[in-house]
Amino acid sequence: MYVSMKNMLQKANTEGYAVMAINCFNIETSRAVIEAAQELRAPIIVNIVQEHMVNHCDSELIAPIVRKLAQRASVEVALNFDHGEELGLIKKAIVDGYSSVMVDASKFDLEGNIKMTREVVCFAEPYGVSVEGEIGCIGGSEGGNFTQEAMLTNPEEAKRFIDETGIDCLAISIGTSHGNYPEGYTPEFRFDRLKEIKQLTQMPLVLHGGSGSGSGNIKKAVACGINKINVGIDFMNANVDSIKKQLSINPNINYWVMMNKVEQDSKKLVKEYIKLSGSSNKSL
């Protein structure tokens, strides 16, 4: 079933679990993610980050593919434009058939963020497309640019942002970062900040940078009010690890055979996160 994120996240918010959003970029990754969700009877979100959409699979190309895969599934599947920074690209993704978009207006101040996000909400409404906004700033592990205290989401600003934009879900910064963490490093979540934001907003909340956060942090974040968890690098690493393993066993392996095995191997990682999120058997 091809749907927007709105109803699936409202249900998750009401029942106290999270929906996994996995970063994909082609038919193979999208199919692996949807099949994993199908096997566990879980709703799922296929994320396409702006960089991948621009450089690998434009919205006209990927939207029909994911829509068809979703229509063949009996669980809810949303296609979300992740970290959309350019207004034109966000609107094009909506027109081309994305069911959801995430506005990343972190380059602006609060007023600018509200203005851009509200414009997207107004544009998306006639299409039935859900909109995710973001308050706070999430760092990246590359170059040691981890999320700092000053980058965490301000609860009062979060409440104002929701009220003035009309978004369907809110991405917040509580200590995670994008990318690979150093070996042995686990981020420290600000659960106190998460609880405060949840209490003020009662909104479906989104955790970006879920990769490498640790099962304990993930479970507690869900218990404290996170309803959507983004995972990118862990899934990409699972795909690469499968390729490396197969080539080490058989350097002359047929490409199609290898890619088919990659899909099957990477599904295991998606299933692990689905179980952590509590969304198994939550499909309608």
Image: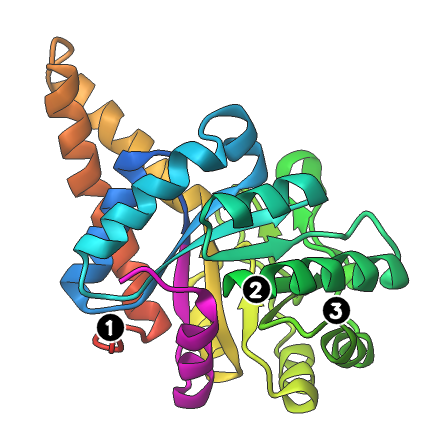
- Which residue is farthest top? 252
Mark positioned earlier in the residue sequence (3 or 2): 2
State yes or no: residue 93 in magenta. Answer: no
Q: Secondary structure at mark 2?
A: helix
Tell me the quadrant of the picture where the N terminus can be found: bottom left
**Which residue carries the number 1 mark?**
280
Q: Position of residue 249 (x, y in %)?
A: 12, 20
- Using the image, tell me which numbered label, if any, was put on residue 153: 3
In the rendered image of this protein, does residue 235 appear above or below residue 21?
above
Q: Secondary structure at mark 1?
A: loop
Q: Position of residue 160 (x, y in %)?
A: 80, 79
- Which residue is farthest front? 126
**Which residue carries the number 2 mark?**
126
Query: At x 59% / y 56%, what residue is drawn?
Result: 102
Going by the numbered disc 1, the residue's amino acid type is Ser
* Spatial separation of the CA atoms under disc 3 and disc 1: 29 Å
- Using the image, tell me which numbered label, if any, was put on residue 252: none
Q: Quadrant of residue 235?
A: top left
Query: At x 60% / y 58%, what residue is drawn?
Result: 176
Q: Quadrant of residue 168?
A: bottom right
* Spatial separation of the CA atoms under disc 3 and disc 2: 30 Å
